[in-house]
Amino acid sequence: MLLKGGATFLLFLQQILVARLSGTESYGNYAFVLGWLTLLVLLGPLGFDTAAVRFVSVYTIKKNLAGLKGFFIRGLQIVASASAACALLVILVSRSTLSDSSFELRTTFAWGALYLFVLGAVQFGTAILQGLQRVHLSFIMRSLILPFLSIVGVLLFIAFSSRTSLLSYHVVAIEFIAGGIVSIVLYKVIFKQLPRSLLEHEKEVATGEWLRTAMPIWAHTGFKLGMDKSGIILSGILLGTVSSGLFSVSVQASNLLGFGLFTVSSLAAPRIARLFAEGKSEELQSLIKLSTKVALAFAVVSGLTLLVFGELLLGLFGSEFRAAYIPLCILIFGQVLNSFAGPVGSLLIMTGNERRSAKVGMLAFLVNLLFMPVLIHLFGLLGAALATTFTAALWNGLLIRDVRRVLKLNPTLLKSWSVS
């Protein structure tokens, strides 16, 4: 929890620094591009990042070093190839759709295409560490060191350049360099954590099995990210990138409530896979109940605090960002609903029910795409927040239903929903 708190503080400090030094227009461009990049980086690993937590954990428990070696090598190959394809797509689309007058935005997308490579590598590498039961180390690399280096990079840029402000492509370029440094250190750490005898084994490749497992996970994560980022992306398209920046800040503030859920899900994921494989359903139910209790308690307390001090918090980014307070209030409610459901997504994925999770995600994502543009057109950023909260409630409700029906577990704290 302390690590996550430190990471949240660093991320907020980074975003406040960037917003203060960029202004609403450049920060809006940065938020708009980053929204796309966050979504596209999912397409790079093709679900291998989340699948790595499961397969690496199982291979390690069973001491299947040939399978572990094969998964690691093939995963890197797929991540690199798919990331290259996504980067090329970003460059081609941005050059063909943005006019010459959008130089800043076009240049930001160009740097973003390069950033996709390191984001994919970092995402896959941290998942490998989680599968090796090095969850804290994984978290430190991505959520502490990466934003810290980005902050240092921004301060150095301002100190040693003649500029007193940042453009959006400056920020993305700095984050690309920081990500590259983290990638190098990350994979050195991974090689030290892997068994020394791994090099002596022939690799065992089961690409078909891995892809059959990874693709539904890819779809689940993609639909979830699509819903999370659709408000930022669509508000930028329909209302302008300044609105994208405003909504991005409200989303980041509301994500503070997900601190507990993210932490317990990351810690519980490897244990869920292990307990399910060992058939210990009672221990699994206890783990899920504890995870939900911690996540919901944190969400409620932090949500009430944010309702009171949210406008002040948004003002730290700049006085213009206070306009995002009402959307923030709506997003807070959606985050509480997420925590009420507990780690249902991880529960289904880690127990081999990723296809059910993907189907639910597809339905919720389509509903989101249907309502989001209409509500943004009618109510602006308020509509984006309403659509995000509604589809989050739908998503979690359907996942709770599947967990109860398929796994005979109750992910919530409601005793009346317990499964006999």
Image (spheres, helix red, strand yellow):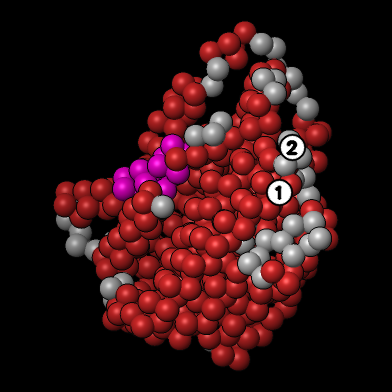
Left or right of residue 212, residue 252 in this image: left
Please rate how many residues cluster around mark 1, counting C-alpha atoms within 10 Å: few if below 14, some from 14 to 19, many from 20. Answer: few
> In the rendered view of the protein, which quadrant contains the C terminus?
bottom right
User: Magenta stretch containing residue 143, yes or no?
Assistant: yes
Left or right of residue 69, residue 214 in this image: right
Q: Residue at x 60, y 73 (%)?
A: 337
Q: Residue at x 62, y 41 (%)?
A: 271
Is 109 drawn above or below residue 372 in the view shown? above
Q: Identity of the amino acid at label 2? A: Ala
* Residue 369 seen anywhere in this rendered image of the structure: no
Q: Disc number at residue 282?
A: 1
Secondary structure character of the magenta stretch overall: helix
Tell me the quarter of the picture where residue 223 sits.
Answer: bottom right
Q: Disc number at residue 65?
A: none
Span of residues in magenta:
137-150
Q: Secondary structure at mark 1?
A: helix
Is 298 drawn above or below residue 208 in the view shown? below
Is 407 drawn above or below residue 49 in the view shown? below
